[in-house]
């Protein structure tokens, strides 16, 4: 038997991914789960998804909570589905099990066997093509429905913004408003700990070295921006 993989994805980092993971582990407890937050509708740019695809081999299984987790773009979804199917990878969609590759495979295998009769074989070949096309249409329909749901959500969001603006409500972040990120919060905390301008003993250069070691890349401009904000917050 091949290996089992599972993929979970959320559109925004503020969303919760636990529900998907719970569904996946309940159905396939031995599957290795890849997860990420990704905003786009296509498959490009999804690092964890690409890592998983590079690991799977013929006979392996990939499990998704729903077809939208694989792709929310119908053309990309059907192409990827067929590519993986042709490579011998099994696909499972917990919420759309009617398009699992096993179901698709069964539809193809249920076609009439060749008889050796030339006229009958022409009819059989045509019948096989029809059955395959019907199965592919079902798969495409699932991806198109997922894509439509995304488009409808975007339209409802736009309508909500238009209505809020009509009523004079503030939409989005006010000009000049600051957003606290995990990186800025951690950097300011370390700045207070190490900088001699606060509770520490180090100059700005050495403080930057300490912060970069903990939070990653931090430009001089960003450092002094955080420092200024910190002075204002503590004033």
Image: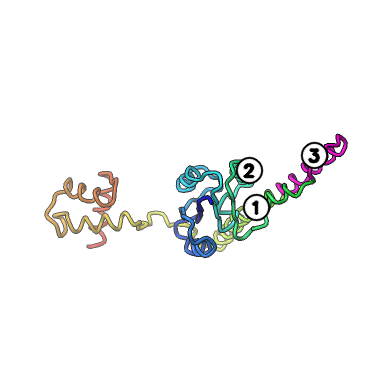
Q: On the rendered structure, is 124 left or right of 197?
A: right
- What is the x, y in percent for residue 130? 78, 44
Q: On the rendered structure, is 200 left or right of 51?
A: left
* CA distance separating discs 1 and 3: 21 Å
Task: Give the magenta part as a residue range.
Answer: 113-137
Q: Residue at x 20, y 58 (%)?
A: 192
| Closer to the eye: label 1 or 2 | 1
Tell me: residue 122, above or below residue 178: above
Q: Nearer the viewer, residue 183 or 35?
A: 35
Q: Circle 2 is placed at which residue position?
A: 82
Q: Is residue 130 magenta?
A: yes
Which of the marked residues, 3 or 2, is nearer the chain's N terminus? 2
* CA distance separating discs 3 and 2: 20 Å
Q: Circle 1 is placed at which residue position?
A: 102
Q: Circle 3 is placed at which residue position?
A: 125
Which of the marked residues, 1 or 2, is nearer the chain's N terminus? 2
Q: Nearer the viewer, residue 211 or 103?
A: 103
- The local secondary structure at tag 2 comes to helix
Q: Nearer the viewer, residue 70 or 116?
A: 116
Q: Is residue 233 magenta?
A: no
* CA distance separating discs 1 and 2: 13 Å
- What is the x, y in percent for residue 83? 60, 41
The chief SS type of the magenta part is helix
- What is the x, y in percent for residue 145? 66, 54
For disc 2, the neighbor class at 10 Å (few under 14, some 14 to 19, many from 20) is some
Label pair 1/2, CB-CB below 8 angstroms: no
Looking at the image, the residue that sits furthest to the top is 118
Which of the marked residues, 1 or 3, is nearer the chain's N terminus? 1
- What is the x, y in percent for residue 122? 84, 37
Q: Residue at x 30, y 58 (%)?
A: 185
């Amino acid at each position: 038997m091949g290996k089992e993989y599972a993929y979970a994805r959320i559109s925004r980092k503020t969303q919760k991914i636990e529900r998907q993971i719970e569904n996946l582990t309940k159905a396939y407890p031995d599957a290795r789960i890849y997860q990420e937050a990704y905003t786009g509708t296509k498959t490009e740019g999804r690092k964890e998804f690409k890592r998983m695809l590079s690991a799977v081999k013929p006979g392996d299984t990939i499990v998704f909570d729903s077809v939208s987790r694989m792709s929310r773009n119908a053309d990309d979804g059907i192409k990827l589905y067929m590519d993986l199917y042709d490579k011998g990878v099994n696909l499972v969609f917990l919420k759309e099990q009617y398009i699992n590759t096993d179901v698709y495979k069964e539809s193809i295998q249920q076609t009439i066997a060749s008889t050796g009769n030339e006229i009958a074989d022409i009819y059989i070949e045509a019948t096989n093509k029809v059955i395959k096309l019907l199965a592919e249409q079902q798969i495409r329909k699932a991806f198109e429905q997922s894509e439509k749901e995304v488009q409808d959500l975007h339209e409802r969001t736009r309508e909500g913004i238009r209505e809020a603006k009509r009523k004079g409500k503030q939409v989005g972040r006010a000009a000049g408003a600051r957003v606290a990120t995990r990186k800025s919060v951690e950097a300011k905390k370390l700045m207070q700990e190490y900088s001699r301008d606060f509770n520490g003993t180090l100059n700005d250069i050495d403080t930057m070295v300490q912060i970069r070691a903990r939070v990653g890349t931090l430009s001089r401009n960003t450092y002094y921006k955080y420092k200024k904000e910190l002075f204002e917050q503590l004033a």
